Image: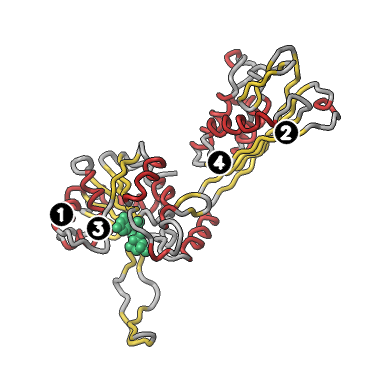
């Protein structure tokens, strides 16, 4: 679930860095953790904000637009983190009362951390930011040798999102173009008191190569993975075409059913309801209800997919098997996959449609009808 921010709140997600410490490959915010880019996860945490500004490197503008344009305003950043934040703030001038500024490289920020910052601002703090007290002993070193112990009382490890009144932090950035390590430091320099709110060990900033594996381990502990299966059968009857997985196929018979009798789509829809433990098509679209007579089965699949999304799930993959002697499915399988993927909002390569005969055995073997089984995985993290 995401935090619903009060009206007047905006978020800036900074993602214009190059991630030089994170090792080879794409910049760290574009690399995946458990199948989803770091930046997707950071942005998703702020989906409940009325305005979101994403700051990216000029080289990444195209990728950012194709992936995030629409709900998110995208601007280009600068050479330093402060320059990038300032670009985001300038884009928000006059358009919000408060702003939370978050590192795009912190993909696992939790609702509690974000809510803590909002609550402090709502309670009247001029600025608020999450941090964790330092718990390890601190040393000063001379090369590789300990030179002395440093007191750790009163020391905190700073995190993001850091929250401010928009006009105050924008003025602070304009007054201090030299920048600082983070926005709290700039706010302090401009004389604003900053309150500390609870941080979280999970809210790590991906910095070093090993941080990707660490983030995956944290996610693995939280992930809710669901598996669902569905099965459906429709008998052949009079007709000259059938609908299978959203594709119309000419045939010497039709399929009998209350709706369009799309047996593949029905099995897949039931698999989703099954994964959600929310019954089956018959429960959501009773066959006794005349409004579903001849209905396009897309309605059922869309309903199930929307239910999954409303509950915070995304699709891992889906696999549909059609069992029939005829028609031949192979020539249509690609179109079926595309159709199902479009309805479910699933990227290609995560959906499969395949077919088998039953060696002329049983009702499908005797060409009395078509059966279908489907499996789907849903993931929430
Ligand atoms: N950032 C930015 N613009 C910059 C530098 C950093 O928007 N010129 C962003 C990064 O994309 C990141 C956050 O600020 O989300 C924190 O910075 P950091 O962890 O230092 O990321 P990078 O600068 O990309 O990494 P490195 O310092 O290892 O190169
Ligand atoms: Mg950096």
| Quadrant position of ligand 1 | bottom left
Question: Of the residues under marks 3 and 4, which one precedes in the sequence?
Answer: 3
Residue linked to disc 3: 82
Q: CA distance from mark 3 to mark 1?
A: 10 Å
Q: Secondary structure at mark 3?
A: helix
Say above or below: 52 vs 215. Answer: above
Which quadrant holds the N terminus? top left
Q: Secondary structure at mark 1?
A: helix
Instruction: Mark yes or no: residue 197 visible.
Output: no
Question: Of the residues under marks 4 and 2, which one precedes in the sequence?
Answer: 4
Report whether the residue tagged 1 is closer than 8 Å to ligand 1: no
Residue at (63%, 28%) from the top-left corner? 245
Question: Of the residues under marks 2 and 3, which one precedes in the sequence?
Answer: 3
Left or right position of 367 against 291: right
Say above or below: 257 vs 41. Answer: above
Instruction: Mark yes or no: residue 280 visible.
Output: yes
Residue linked to disc 4: 315
Q: Are marks 2 and 3 in contact (CB under 8 Å)?
A: no
Quadrant of the rendered structure where residue 142 is?
bottom left
Q: Nearer the viewer, residue 312 or 348?
A: 348
Q: Position of residue 47 (x, y in %)?
A: 38, 42
Residue at (67%, 31%) from the top-left corner? 267
Q: Secondary structure at mark 2?
A: strand
Residue linked to disc 1: 174
Q: Secondary structure at mark 4?
A: strand
Q: Which mark is residue 355?
A: 2
């Amino acid at each position: 679930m995401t935090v619903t921010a009060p009206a007047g709140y905006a978020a800036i997600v900074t993602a214009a860095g190059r991630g030089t410490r994170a090792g080879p490959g794409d910049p760290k915010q574009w690399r995946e953790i458990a199948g989803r880019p770091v930046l997707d996860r950071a942005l998703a945490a702020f989906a409940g904000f009325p305005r979101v500004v994403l700051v990216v490197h000029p080289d990444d503008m195209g990728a950012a637009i194709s992936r995030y344009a629409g709900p998110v305003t995208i601007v280009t950043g600068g050479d330093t983190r402060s320059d990038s934040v300032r670009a985001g703030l300038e884009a928000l001038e006059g358009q919000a009362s408060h702003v939370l500024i978050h590192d795009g490289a912190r993909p696992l920020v939790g609702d509690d951390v974000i809510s803590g910052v909002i609550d402090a601002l709502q309670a009247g703090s001029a600025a608020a930011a999450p941090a964790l007290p330092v718990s390890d002993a601190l040393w000063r070193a001379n090369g590789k040798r300990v030179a002395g112990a440093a007191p750790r009382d009163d020391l905190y490890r700073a995190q993001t999102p850091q929250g401010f009144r928009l006009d105050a932090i924008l003025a602070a950035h304009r007054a201090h173009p030299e920048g600082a390590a983070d926005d709290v430091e700039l706010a302090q320099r401009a004389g604003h008191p900053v309150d500390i709110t609870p941080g979280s060990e999970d809210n790590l900033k991906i910095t070093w190569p090993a941080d990707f594996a660490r983030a995956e381990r944290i996610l693995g502990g939280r992930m809710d993975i669901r598996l669902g299966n569905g099965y459906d059968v429709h008998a052949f009857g009079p007709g000259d075409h059938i609908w299978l997985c959203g594709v119309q196929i000419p045939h010497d018979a039709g399929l009998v059913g209350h709706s369009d009798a799309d047996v593949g789509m029905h099995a897949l829809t039931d698999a989703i309801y099954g994964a959600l433990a929310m019954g089956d098509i018959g429960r959501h679209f009773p066959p006794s209800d005349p409004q579903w007579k001849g209905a396009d089965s897309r309605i059922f699949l869309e309903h199930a997919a929307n239910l999954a999304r409303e509950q915070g799930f995304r699709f891992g993959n889906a696999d549909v098997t059609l069992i029939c002697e005829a028609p031949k499915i192979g020539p249509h399988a690609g179109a079926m996959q595309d159709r199902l993927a479009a309805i479910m909002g699933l990227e290609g390569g995560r959906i499969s449609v395949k077919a088998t005969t039953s060696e002329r055995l049983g009702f499908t073997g005797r060409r009395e009808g078509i059966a279908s089984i489907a499996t789907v995985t849903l993931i929430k993290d």
